[in-house]
Image: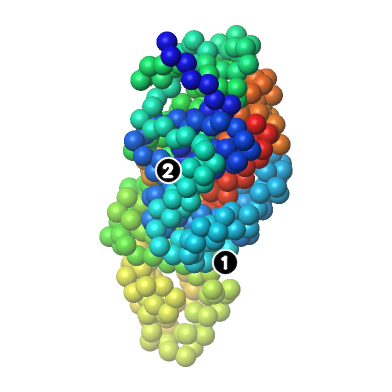
Amino acid sequence: MKQQHYDVVILGAGAAGLMCAATAGYQGHSVLVLDHANKPGKKILMSGGGRCNFTNLNTTPSHFTSANPHFCKSALNRYSPWHFLELVERHGVEHVEKAPGQLFCAGSSKDILRVLLTECEWAGAEVRLNTAVTHLNGVVVDGEGAVPEWAERVADGFRLRTAEGGEIHARRLVVATGGLSIPTLGAGPFGYRLAARFGLPVRPTRAGLVPFTLQPADKAWLAELAGVSAEVVAEAGGRRFAEPLLITHRGLSGPAMLQVSSFWTPGEPVTVDWLPALADPAADLRAARAAQPGTGVEKWLRGFVSQRLAAALTEHFDWGGPLQHHGNERLAEIAAVLKGWRFKPSGTEGYRTAEVTLGGLDTDAVSSKTFEAKAVPGLHFIGEVLDVTGELGGFNFQWAWASAHAAALAL
Protein backbone atom coordinates (compact mmCIF):
# COMPACT_ATOMS: atom_id res chain seq x y z
CA MET A 1 0.00 0.00 0.00
CA LYS A 2 1.44 3.36 -1.03
CA GLN A 3 2.32 5.53 1.96
CA GLN A 4 2.60 9.32 2.04
CA HIS A 5 4.42 11.19 4.79
CA TYR A 6 3.55 14.62 6.24
CA ASP A 7 4.66 16.47 9.31
CA VAL A 8 1.07 17.52 10.00
CA VAL A 9 -2.28 16.14 8.85
CA ILE A 10 -5.35 18.24 9.66
CA LEU A 11 -8.83 16.73 9.57
CA GLY A 12 -11.33 19.35 8.44
CA ALA A 13 -11.11 22.12 5.84
CA GLY A 14 -13.20 24.64 7.73
CA ALA A 15 -12.20 27.89 9.40
CA ALA A 16 -9.99 26.35 12.10
CA GLY A 17 -8.48 23.69 9.86
CA LEU A 18 -7.46 26.05 7.07
CA MET A 19 -6.10 28.63 9.51
CA CYS A 20 -4.03 25.96 11.23
CA ALA A 21 -2.77 24.61 7.91
CA ALA A 22 -1.51 27.97 6.68
CA THR A 23 0.13 28.84 10.01
CA ALA A 24 1.79 25.43 10.27
CA GLY A 25 2.98 25.64 6.68
CA TYR A 26 4.67 28.96 7.39
CA GLN A 27 6.49 27.24 10.28
CA GLY A 28 8.18 25.01 7.72
CA HIS A 29 6.03 21.90 8.19
CA SER A 30 4.71 19.75 5.38
CA VAL A 31 0.93 19.96 5.82
CA LEU A 32 -2.03 18.02 4.42
CA VAL A 33 -5.68 18.96 5.06
CA LEU A 34 -8.26 16.22 4.55
CA ASP A 35 -12.02 16.74 4.28
CA HIS A 36 -14.81 14.43 3.20
CA ALA A 37 -16.76 17.37 1.68
CA ASN A 38 -16.57 18.40 -1.95
CA LYS A 39 -15.81 22.05 -1.11
CA PRO A 40 -13.77 23.72 1.64
CA GLY A 41 -15.19 26.21 4.13
CA LYS A 42 -18.89 25.56 3.54
CA LYS A 43 -19.86 27.04 6.90
CA ILE A 44 -17.77 30.12 6.18
CA LEU A 45 -19.64 30.67 2.93
CA MET A 46 -23.13 30.54 4.49
CA SER A 47 -22.29 32.50 7.64
CA GLY A 48 -23.51 36.02 8.26
CA GLY A 49 -26.11 35.79 5.53
CA GLY A 50 -23.34 35.20 3.01
CA ARG A 51 -21.23 38.08 4.33
CA CYS A 52 -19.31 36.24 7.10
CA ASN A 53 -19.10 37.97 10.49
CA PHE A 54 -15.44 36.97 10.63
CA THR A 55 -14.51 38.42 14.03
CA ASN A 56 -15.56 40.71 16.86
CA LEU A 57 -13.20 43.44 18.00
CA ASN A 58 -14.68 43.26 21.51
CA THR A 59 -13.75 39.60 22.03
CA THR A 60 -13.06 38.61 25.64
CA PRO A 61 -13.23 35.24 27.42
CA SER A 62 -16.55 36.33 28.95
CA HIS A 63 -18.18 35.86 25.53
CA PHE A 64 -17.58 32.10 25.62
CA THR A 65 -19.31 29.19 27.35
CA SER A 66 -17.40 26.14 28.56
CA ALA A 67 -17.28 23.81 31.54
CA ASN A 68 -13.84 25.37 32.04
CA PRO A 69 -14.27 29.11 31.38
CA HIS A 70 -10.53 29.72 31.80
CA PHE A 71 -9.48 27.38 28.98
CA CYS A 72 -10.00 29.88 26.14
CA LYS A 73 -8.01 32.73 27.73
CA SER A 74 -4.52 31.79 26.60
CA ALA A 75 -5.31 31.37 22.90
CA LEU A 76 -7.52 34.46 22.74
CA ASN A 77 -4.83 36.57 24.38
CA ARG A 78 -2.17 35.37 21.96
CA TYR A 79 -4.18 35.85 18.76
CA SER A 80 -6.54 38.81 18.92
CA PRO A 81 -9.20 40.04 16.47
CA TRP A 82 -6.71 42.68 15.37
CA HIS A 83 -4.31 39.98 14.21
CA PHE A 84 -6.94 38.45 11.95
CA LEU A 85 -8.10 41.89 10.78
CA GLU A 86 -4.53 42.66 9.72
CA LEU A 87 -4.51 39.45 7.67
CA VAL A 88 -7.82 40.31 6.03
CA GLU A 89 -6.74 43.85 5.19
CA ARG A 90 -3.41 42.60 3.83
CA HIS A 91 -5.41 40.62 1.27
CA GLY A 92 -7.44 43.71 0.34
CA VAL A 93 -10.75 42.46 1.72
CA GLU A 94 -13.11 45.34 2.40
CA HIS A 95 -15.18 45.04 5.57
CA VAL A 96 -17.94 46.83 7.44
CA GLU A 97 -18.83 47.11 11.13
CA LYS A 98 -22.56 46.38 11.21
CA ALA A 99 -22.80 46.52 15.01
CA PRO A 100 -20.18 47.60 17.54
CA GLY A 101 -17.22 45.28 17.08
CA GLN A 102 -18.91 42.95 14.58
CA LEU A 103 -16.93 42.88 11.34
CA PHE A 104 -18.48 41.53 8.12
CA CYS A 105 -17.22 41.31 4.58
CA ALA A 106 -18.38 44.26 2.53
CA GLY A 107 -18.75 41.87 -0.37
CA SER A 108 -19.08 38.13 0.10
CA SER A 109 -18.03 35.40 2.53
CA LYS A 110 -16.04 34.03 -0.41
CA ASP A 111 -13.47 36.73 0.36
CA ILE A 112 -12.58 35.14 3.72
CA LEU A 113 -12.36 31.67 2.20
CA ARG A 114 -10.17 33.08 -0.55
CA VAL A 115 -7.81 34.56 2.08
CA LEU A 116 -7.47 31.22 3.85
CA LEU A 117 -6.97 29.17 0.69
CA THR A 118 -4.46 31.68 -0.66
CA GLU A 119 -2.55 31.54 2.62
CA CYS A 120 -2.53 27.75 2.45
CA GLU A 121 -1.19 27.89 -1.09
CA TRP A 122 1.53 30.39 -0.20
CA ALA A 123 2.47 28.32 2.87
CA GLY A 124 2.66 25.12 0.81
CA ALA A 125 -0.20 23.39 2.63
CA GLU A 126 -2.09 20.85 0.53
CA VAL A 127 -5.90 20.68 0.75
CA ARG A 128 -7.44 17.38 -0.34
CA LEU A 129 -11.25 17.17 -0.61
CA ASN A 130 -13.68 14.27 -1.12
CA THR A 131 -11.40 12.27 1.14
CA ALA A 132 -12.92 10.43 4.09
CA VAL A 133 -10.65 8.96 6.75
CA THR A 134 -11.70 5.40 7.59
CA HIS A 135 -8.84 4.02 9.71
CA LEU A 136 -6.39 5.44 12.19
CA ASN A 137 -3.46 3.31 13.36
CA GLY A 138 -5.11 0.31 11.77
CA VAL A 139 -8.43 0.71 13.62
CA VAL A 140 -11.76 1.81 12.16
CA VAL A 141 -12.30 5.41 13.32
CA ASP A 142 -16.07 5.55 13.15
CA GLY A 143 -16.61 2.72 15.60
CA GLU A 144 -17.69 2.59 19.21
CA GLY A 145 -15.77 2.27 22.43
CA ALA A 146 -12.28 3.32 23.41
CA VAL A 147 -9.21 1.61 22.02
CA PRO A 148 -6.54 2.49 24.60
CA GLU A 149 -3.69 1.00 22.59
CA TRP A 150 -4.18 3.85 20.13
CA ALA A 151 -2.53 6.06 22.73
CA GLU A 152 0.67 4.12 22.17
CA ARG A 153 0.69 5.51 18.61
CA VAL A 154 2.91 4.11 15.91
CA ALA A 155 6.57 4.99 15.70
CA ASP A 156 6.78 8.70 15.18
CA GLY A 157 3.12 9.57 14.64
CA PHE A 158 -0.17 8.36 13.22
CA ARG A 159 -1.21 6.17 10.28
CA LEU A 160 -4.37 7.13 8.43
CA ARG A 161 -6.18 5.23 5.74
CA THR A 162 -8.81 6.86 3.52
CA ALA A 163 -11.76 5.49 1.59
CA GLU A 164 -9.84 6.25 -1.60
CA GLY A 165 -7.03 3.87 -0.58
CA GLY A 166 -3.46 4.48 0.31
CA GLU A 167 -1.94 5.20 3.71
CA ILE A 168 -0.89 8.55 5.11
CA HIS A 169 1.66 8.90 7.87
CA ALA A 170 1.53 12.03 10.06
CA ARG A 171 3.96 13.08 12.74
CA ARG A 172 1.17 15.26 14.21
CA LEU A 173 -2.59 14.96 13.80
CA VAL A 174 -4.95 17.93 14.24
CA VAL A 175 -8.70 17.37 14.57
CA ALA A 176 -10.66 20.36 13.24
CA THR A 177 -13.84 18.53 12.28
CA GLY A 178 -16.29 20.94 13.93
CA GLY A 179 -19.52 20.02 15.65
CA LEU A 180 -22.98 18.77 14.75
CA SER A 181 -24.62 21.99 13.60
CA ILE A 182 -26.07 22.15 10.08
CA PRO A 183 -25.56 18.54 8.96
CA THR A 184 -26.50 19.45 5.37
CA LEU A 185 -23.08 21.14 5.17
CA GLY A 186 -21.37 17.90 6.18
CA ALA A 187 -21.31 18.27 9.97
CA GLY A 188 -21.19 15.08 12.00
CA PRO A 189 -19.83 13.36 15.13
CA PHE A 190 -16.54 12.22 13.60
CA GLY A 191 -14.35 14.35 15.89
CA TYR A 192 -16.15 13.25 19.04
CA ARG A 193 -15.97 9.59 18.05
CA LEU A 194 -12.28 9.88 17.27
CA ALA A 195 -11.68 11.45 20.70
CA ALA A 196 -13.70 8.73 22.40
CA ARG A 197 -11.72 6.03 20.60
CA PHE A 198 -8.64 7.46 22.27
CA GLY A 199 -10.40 7.33 25.62
CA LEU A 200 -10.73 11.12 25.81
CA PRO A 201 -13.82 12.48 27.64
CA VAL A 202 -16.53 14.13 25.54
CA ARG A 203 -19.11 16.31 27.26
CA PRO A 204 -22.81 16.07 26.24
CA THR A 205 -23.64 18.11 23.15
CA ARG A 206 -26.70 20.12 22.15
CA ALA A 207 -27.66 22.75 19.62
CA GLY A 208 -26.65 26.34 20.39
CA LEU A 209 -27.48 29.71 18.83
CA VAL A 210 -30.68 28.13 17.55
CA PRO A 211 -34.31 29.30 17.12
CA PHE A 212 -36.97 28.23 19.60
CA THR A 213 -40.11 26.28 18.77
CA LEU A 214 -43.34 27.13 20.61
CA GLN A 215 -46.01 25.42 22.63
CA PRO A 216 -49.35 25.19 20.74
CA ALA A 217 -50.97 27.95 22.81
CA ASP A 218 -48.22 30.47 22.00
CA LYS A 219 -47.86 29.34 18.40
CA ALA A 220 -51.60 29.90 17.86
CA TRP A 221 -51.30 33.68 18.14
CA LEU A 222 -47.66 34.27 17.24
CA ALA A 223 -47.49 32.25 14.00
CA GLU A 224 -49.78 34.80 12.32
CA LEU A 225 -47.05 37.39 12.94
CA ALA A 226 -44.37 35.54 10.94
CA GLY A 227 -41.87 38.06 9.61
CA VAL A 228 -42.48 40.63 12.37
CA SER A 229 -39.43 41.73 14.35
CA ALA A 230 -38.91 43.81 17.48
CA GLU A 231 -36.04 45.14 19.55
CA VAL A 232 -36.23 43.31 22.86
CA VAL A 233 -34.24 42.21 25.87
CA ALA A 234 -34.38 38.42 26.26
CA GLU A 235 -33.31 36.46 29.33
CA ALA A 236 -32.68 32.79 30.05
CA GLY A 237 -30.34 30.96 32.38
CA GLY A 238 -29.39 34.19 34.09
CA ARG A 239 -28.10 35.82 30.88
CA ARG A 240 -29.70 38.87 29.23
CA PHE A 241 -29.28 40.07 25.66
CA ALA A 242 -30.56 43.27 24.06
CA GLU A 243 -31.03 42.19 20.44
CA PRO A 244 -33.75 41.93 17.78
CA LEU A 245 -36.34 39.16 18.00
CA LEU A 246 -37.90 37.68 14.86
CA ILE A 247 -41.21 35.81 14.78
CA THR A 248 -41.28 32.94 12.28
CA HIS A 249 -43.92 30.42 11.24
CA ARG A 250 -42.08 27.83 13.36
CA GLY A 251 -41.39 29.89 16.48
CA LEU A 252 -39.08 32.67 17.69
CA SER A 253 -35.73 33.48 16.14
CA GLY A 254 -33.52 36.50 15.60
CA PRO A 255 -30.33 37.36 17.52
CA ALA A 256 -32.10 37.72 20.87
CA MET A 257 -33.49 34.19 20.78
CA LEU A 258 -30.33 32.67 19.32
CA GLN A 259 -28.24 34.20 22.09
CA VAL A 260 -30.37 33.01 25.00
CA SER A 261 -30.83 29.54 23.46
CA SER A 262 -27.25 28.73 24.46
CA PHE A 263 -28.09 29.35 28.13
CA TRP A 264 -31.63 27.97 28.19
CA THR A 265 -32.44 24.76 30.05
CA PRO A 266 -35.28 22.67 28.56
CA GLY A 267 -38.44 23.05 30.62
CA GLU A 268 -37.45 26.49 31.89
CA PRO A 269 -39.06 29.75 30.69
CA VAL A 270 -37.58 32.49 28.54
CA THR A 271 -38.39 36.09 29.46
CA VAL A 272 -38.91 38.84 26.89
CA ASP A 273 -39.00 42.58 27.55
CA TRP A 274 -40.96 43.99 24.61
CA LEU A 275 -40.25 47.61 25.67
CA PRO A 276 -36.54 47.78 26.58
CA ALA A 277 -36.40 51.52 25.82
CA LEU A 278 -39.13 52.27 28.36
CA ALA A 279 -38.10 52.04 32.01
CA ASP A 280 -41.57 52.53 33.50
CA PRO A 281 -44.36 51.71 31.04
CA ALA A 282 -47.01 51.90 33.80
CA ALA A 283 -46.13 55.56 34.37
CA ASP A 284 -46.15 56.18 30.63
CA LEU A 285 -49.57 54.54 30.33
CA ARG A 286 -50.95 56.71 33.14
CA ALA A 287 -49.58 59.80 31.42
CA ALA A 288 -51.16 58.71 28.12
CA ARG A 289 -54.49 58.13 29.89
CA ALA A 290 -54.39 61.61 31.39
CA ALA A 291 -53.50 63.24 28.06
CA GLN A 292 -55.82 61.15 25.83
CA PRO A 293 -58.36 59.22 27.90
CA GLY A 294 -60.09 57.84 24.83
CA THR A 295 -57.00 56.28 23.27
CA GLY A 296 -56.36 52.54 23.63
CA VAL A 297 -53.44 50.34 24.63
CA GLU A 298 -52.96 49.24 21.02
CA LYS A 299 -52.53 52.79 19.75
CA TRP A 300 -50.14 53.55 22.60
CA LEU A 301 -48.11 50.40 21.84
CA ARG A 302 -47.66 51.44 18.21
CA GLY A 303 -45.25 54.06 19.47
CA PHE A 304 -42.87 51.28 20.48
CA VAL A 305 -43.56 48.17 18.37
CA SER A 306 -44.96 47.42 14.92
CA GLN A 307 -48.66 47.85 14.22
CA ARG A 308 -49.17 44.11 13.72
CA LEU A 309 -47.43 43.23 16.97
CA ALA A 310 -49.29 45.93 18.91
CA ALA A 311 -52.62 44.59 17.64
CA ALA A 312 -51.72 40.98 18.40
CA LEU A 313 -50.54 41.71 21.95
CA THR A 314 -53.64 43.76 22.69
CA GLU A 315 -55.99 41.08 21.38
CA HIS A 316 -54.20 38.11 22.94
CA PHE A 317 -54.02 39.63 26.41
CA ASP A 318 -57.44 41.30 26.19
CA TRP A 319 -56.23 44.87 26.65
CA GLY A 320 -59.00 46.42 24.56
CA GLY A 321 -61.03 49.51 25.37
CA PRO A 322 -59.98 53.11 26.04
CA LEU A 323 -57.33 53.82 28.65
CA GLN A 324 -59.83 55.70 30.78
CA HIS A 325 -61.52 52.36 31.50
CA HIS A 326 -58.26 50.86 32.87
CA GLY A 327 -57.39 51.61 36.48
CA ASN A 328 -53.86 51.95 37.81
CA GLU A 329 -53.76 48.29 38.88
CA ARG A 330 -54.76 47.16 35.40
CA LEU A 331 -52.14 49.40 33.78
CA ALA A 332 -49.52 47.95 36.13
CA GLU A 333 -50.51 44.43 35.04
CA ILE A 334 -50.20 45.41 31.37
CA ALA A 335 -46.80 46.96 32.01
CA ALA A 336 -45.62 43.82 33.85
CA VAL A 337 -46.48 41.63 30.86
CA LEU A 338 -44.78 43.95 28.39
CA LYS A 339 -41.61 44.16 30.51
CA GLY A 340 -41.48 40.48 31.41
CA TRP A 341 -43.47 38.19 29.10
CA ARG A 342 -42.55 34.60 29.93
CA PHE A 343 -42.96 31.63 27.63
CA LYS A 344 -41.81 28.03 27.81
CA PRO A 345 -40.38 26.85 24.49
CA SER A 346 -41.42 23.41 23.35
CA GLY A 347 -37.81 22.99 22.27
CA THR A 348 -35.47 24.29 19.57
CA GLU A 349 -35.09 23.66 15.86
CA GLY A 350 -32.06 21.51 16.69
CA TYR A 351 -28.85 21.01 14.78
CA ARG A 352 -30.64 21.53 11.46
CA THR A 353 -30.48 25.32 11.89
CA ALA A 354 -28.16 25.72 14.88
CA GLU A 355 -25.13 27.89 14.27
CA VAL A 356 -22.96 26.08 16.82
CA THR A 357 -22.71 22.97 18.97
CA LEU A 358 -22.54 23.32 22.74
CA GLY A 359 -20.37 20.82 24.58
CA GLY A 360 -17.80 18.59 22.91
CA LEU A 361 -14.34 17.37 23.84
CA ASP A 362 -13.73 18.08 27.52
CA THR A 363 -11.07 20.79 27.67
CA ASP A 364 -9.57 19.26 30.83
CA ALA A 365 -8.12 16.63 28.49
CA VAL A 366 -6.34 19.23 26.33
CA SER A 367 -3.53 21.74 26.90
CA SER A 368 -4.80 25.33 26.67
CA LYS A 369 -1.44 26.40 25.25
CA THR A 370 -0.76 23.73 22.62
CA PHE A 371 -4.22 22.14 22.19
CA GLU A 372 -2.53 18.77 22.43
CA ALA A 373 -4.36 15.91 24.12
CA LYS A 374 -2.62 15.38 27.45
CA ALA A 375 -2.90 11.58 27.18
CA VAL A 376 -2.03 11.31 23.48
CA PRO A 377 1.17 13.09 22.40
CA GLY A 378 0.93 14.51 18.91
CA LEU A 379 -2.86 14.64 18.78
CA HIS A 380 -4.42 18.14 18.77
CA PHE A 381 -8.01 19.40 18.78
CA ILE A 382 -9.08 22.91 17.68
CA GLY A 383 -12.22 24.92 16.96
CA GLU A 384 -15.80 23.84 17.54
CA VAL A 385 -15.01 20.20 18.34
CA LEU A 386 -13.87 21.44 21.76
CA ASP A 387 -16.20 22.38 24.62
CA VAL A 388 -15.86 26.11 23.91
CA THR A 389 -18.77 28.00 22.38
CA GLY A 390 -18.95 31.71 21.64
CA GLU A 391 -21.92 34.02 21.64
CA LEU A 392 -23.39 35.34 18.40
CA GLY A 393 -21.46 38.11 16.71
CA GLY A 394 -18.18 36.79 15.28
CA PHE A 395 -16.85 35.23 18.48
CA ASN A 396 -16.90 31.64 17.22
CA PHE A 397 -14.83 32.55 14.18
CA GLN A 398 -12.34 34.33 16.44
CA TRP A 399 -12.10 31.14 18.51
CA ALA A 400 -11.41 29.19 15.32
CA TRP A 401 -8.57 31.56 14.34
CA ALA A 402 -7.09 31.75 17.85
CA SER A 403 -7.20 28.03 18.68
CA ALA A 404 -5.82 27.13 15.23
CA HIS A 405 -2.99 29.63 15.51
CA ALA A 406 -2.01 28.45 18.99
CA ALA A 407 -2.00 24.78 17.97
CA ALA A 408 -0.05 25.46 14.76
CA LEU A 409 2.76 27.20 16.64
CA ALA A 410 3.11 24.13 18.88
CA LEU A 411 3.30 21.52 16.11
Near-viewer residue (220 or 50): 50
Could you tell me the amino acid type at mark 2?
A: Gly
Q: In which quarter of the image is residue 295?
A: bottom left
Q: Is mark 2 on a helix, strand or loop?
A: loop
Q: Earlier in the sequence, mark 1 or mark 2?
A: 2
Taking 166 as reference, is 410 above or below it? below
Give the numbered dot on residue 100: 1
User: Where does the image place residue 84, in percent across and percent down from the top left?
Assistant: 59, 54
Q: Residue at x 58, y 49 (%)?
A: 398
Q: What element carries label 1?
A: loop
Near-viewer residue (199 or 127): 127
Residue 272 appears in the rendering: no
Taking 395 as reference, is 317 above or below it? below
Badge 2 is on which residue?
A: 41
User: Where does the image place residue 298, in percent across and percent down from the top left?
Assistant: 37, 76
Q: Residue at x 38, y 27 (%)?
A: 131
Q: Residues under labels 1 and 2: Cα distance?
A: 26 Å
Image label count: 2
User: Where does the image place residue 237, in percent across and percent down from the top left?
Assistant: 58, 47
Near-viewer residue (121 or 170): 121
**Quarter of the N terminus within the rendering:** top left
Question: How many neighbours does mark 1 have within 10 angstroms: few (below 14), some (14-19), or many (20 or more)?
Answer: few
Residues at marks 1 and 2 touching, judged by CB atoms closer than 8 Å? no
User: Where does the image place residue 73, in percent across and percent down from the top left?
Assistant: 70, 45
